[in-house]
Image (tube, helix red, strand yellow):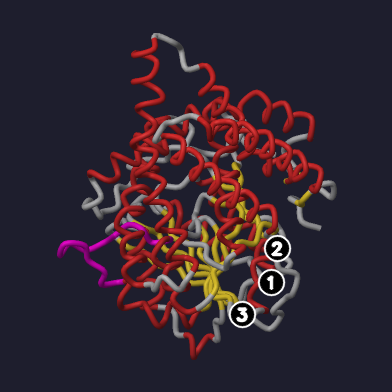
Amino acid sequence: MSRVTLRRWYPVIATLVVAGLILLCVYHIRQLGIPSWRVPIVLVSFGWLCVTIGAAHLNRPARGYASTLKVGVVIPSHNEDPLMLQAMLASIDIQTAIPHAVYFIENGDTNGRAEQIFRQWAAETVVPRTVFMYREQAGKREAQIAAFMREFSLAEHGVDVIATVDGDTQLDERAIFEGLKPFADARVMSVASLLIGKNRTDNLLTRLVDIGFTASFMNGRAAWSRFGSVAVNCGGLAFYRAWVIEKYLHEYAGQTLFGRPVNSGDDRMLTAFAALEGRTVFQETSVGYTLLPSNLSHLTRQRGRWWRSFWWGGLWLIRRFRPTRAIWWLVASQYVTFSLYAVLFPLVVFYDPITHRQFPILFLGYVAGLSYLRSARTLAIRRPDQTFLAQSVQFLLLSPLVSLLNFWLCTMLQWWGLFTFYETGWRTRQKVEVGIAAAAD
């Protein structure tokens, strides 16, 4: 069995979430009599939150299995922790569905350590085909393209599905097997997997990031998956039909923004290309353990890059798709939400307390309540590195703090991404920034 599973009493969690939403609905209904232009904005925002949380709880992982599909795994690596690289490669060998091929791209690191680790693994692996490639110039998208263009001969090697795996992600033993299940539906073009923190216990920041990061899958991607419209997979572990990547490869390689080559937003664009051809879904039973940033500097650079691609990538999708597709409305809702939040948040947090000389305690309590509702689905995950008691205590104590961290990650950096979205390069780390010494099982 998979080391990460969903709790059988998951409906209890869903019931508690519904109860919380009902209480908040009663609160909002009481606001209807207040003559303020802010009330409709709050009601629309809360209504949309109810829809997304409800859709997330209604989403279910696929149960079929496309047993005849052959998988090619593409792994870009740049200044990765050697122990994590070894763990990642070792996790491929214990898969219940062994991939047909593994393509490893050493991406700008000149010390040769990654190549040594890969070749030692390749000499003993059960994977039929292994390929090592080296690129002097770092960049994740370019590394993927190098593998797709130079080594991926689909006709020769018969690859049906491409799995993208980051060098800092260790796979659950059933990750590939579970990730292939949705492809039994011919309409499915890509599958997003669930990522959880490998180094969750490093410090308070990694614990907070782990809750928010996991919730982003169990809420956001799960909700959009209900409509077959996941807009962004996470490169740590994701699956795509090979013919889709082959069809859009030249567009992927030649994408520009204001005449400048786009080197970031790789996961967003691969998912968008898949969505052009069919359904894009989330399979929460396909799991990877990834290294989370353990300091604020690393986390800020990572999320700043994500928000930059959010602005130009989302607009690309809105222009390319038709309003008849659910994904068009889901992406457009993000821009609407941002606009409403940009107006309302400064008023509630700064203007009202100053003018009324009153600390916004009610607002903070409201935000804390929403934090618990958003994080509740993380309790449905039975983790090998955490007892349910520890998981529950962490949920109760840290969920409100996640909202405080998200003020920086999802508000301030979203603005930063808007003003710097034209920066399309890939800012690589110059050294190993996080490892698994403190996260070893």
Mark 1 vs mark 2: in front: 2
Which is more N-terminal, label 3 or label 2? 2
Residue at point 36%, 26% (across, down): 347
For residue 118, above or below residue 113: below
Badge 3 crowding class, 10 Å Cα cut-off, few under 14, some 14 to 19, many 20 or more, is some
Q: Which of 244 and 439 is in front in this view?
A: 244
Check contact, mark 1 vs mark 2: CB within 8 A: yes
Q: Residue at x 44, y 76 (%)?
A: 276
Image location (x, y in percent) of residue 246: 42, 81
Which one is earlier in the sequence, the residue at label 1 or at label 2? 2
Amino acid beneath label 2: Pro
Residue 80 rendering spot, x and y as whole percentages: 45, 47
Q: Quadrant of the C terminus?
A: top right
Q: In the drawing, what numbered circle is on residue 70?
A: 3
Residue bounds of the magenta highlight: 253-267
Label 2 and label 3: CA atoms lie apart by: 21 Å
| Dot in front, 2 or 3 | 2
Upstream in sequence: badge 1 or badge 3: 3
Q: In this view, does 307 lie to the left or right of 290?
A: left
Residue 438 can be seen, yes or no: no
Q: In which quarter of the image is residue 212?
A: top right
Residue with the most extreme top position? 357
Q: Residue 61 carries which label?
A: 2
